[in-house]
C-alpha cells in the first residue's frame, strides 16, 4: 500500500497533478469531439462552383 502523509506540500502537489490530468483528459475529449463533428456534413454538394450571389452578377 502507498503511504499517506499529512505533509501539506505533498498533498498540494498531488492535487495539482490530478487537476492537470483532468485538464489534459478534457482537452483530449474536446479535440476528439471537434474532429468527429468536423466531418459530419461531408458528402455530395447540391451545387457546383462558387456561390455567386447578388454581388457576383
Image (cartoon, rainbow, N blue to C red):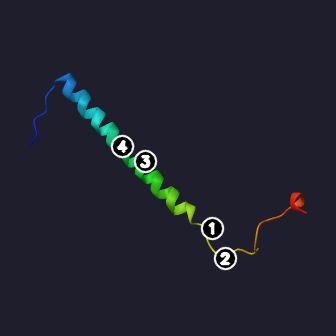
Question: Disc 4 to disc 2, how far (Cα)?
Answer: 39 Å
Depth check, mark 3 against mark 4: the one in front is: 3
Q: Position of residue 48 (x, y in %)?
A: 75, 74
Cβ–Cβ below 8 Å for labels 4 and 1?
Answer: no
- Identify the mark nearer the N-term, 3 or 2: 3
The Cα–Cα distance between marks 3 and 1, rounded to whole angstroms, is: 23 Å
Q: Residue at the spot x=80%, y=65% of the render?
A: 51
Quadrant holding the N terminus: top left
Q: Is residue 23 above or below residue 44?
A: above
User: How many residues crowd around disc 4 within 10 Å: few (fewer than 14), some, or many (20 or more)?
Assistant: few
Dot 3, crowdedness within 10 Å: few (<14), some or many (≥20)?
few
Specify the quadrant that holds the C terminus.
bottom right
Q: Nearer the viewer, residue 14 or 37?
A: 37
Instruction: Please state which of the two labelled residues, at mark 4 or mark 2, is closer to the viewer.
Output: 2
Instruction: Read off the residue under disc 3.
Output: 27
Q: Under tag 2, what secondary structure?
A: loop
Give whichever of 38, 12 is nearer the camera. Answer: 38
**Real-space CA distance between mark 3 and mark 2, rounded to the nearest whole angstrom:** 32 Å
From the viewer's perspective, is 18 left or right of 8?
right
Tell which circle, 3 or 4, labels the residue nearer the N-terminal end: 4
Whether residues under marks 3 and 1 lie with C-beta atoms below 8 angstroms apart, the answer is no
Reading the chain from its start, which is encountered first: label 4 or label 1?
4
Closer to the camera, 52 or 3?
52
Density class for disc 2 (Cα within 10 Å; few <14, some 14-19, many ≥20) is few
Work out whether 30 lies above or below 5.
Answer: below
Residue 55 is left or right of residue 47, and the answer is right
**Residue denoted by label 1:** 41
Among the 4 quarters of the image, the one containing residue 37: bottom right
Q: Position of residue 42 (x, y in %)?
A: 61, 70
The residue identified by callout 4 is 22
What residue is drawn where x is 88% and y is 57%? 55
Amino acid at each position: 500500500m502507498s503511504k499517506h502523509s499529512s505533509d501539506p506540500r505533498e498533498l498540494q502537489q498531488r492535487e495539482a497533478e490530478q487537476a492537470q490530468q483532468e485538464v489534459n483528459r478534457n482537452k483530449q475529449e474536446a479535440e476528439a469531439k471537434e474532429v468527429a463533428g468536423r466531418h459530419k456534413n461531408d458528402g455530395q454538394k447540391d451545387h457546383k462552383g462558387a456561390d455567386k450571389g447578388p454581388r457576383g452578377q
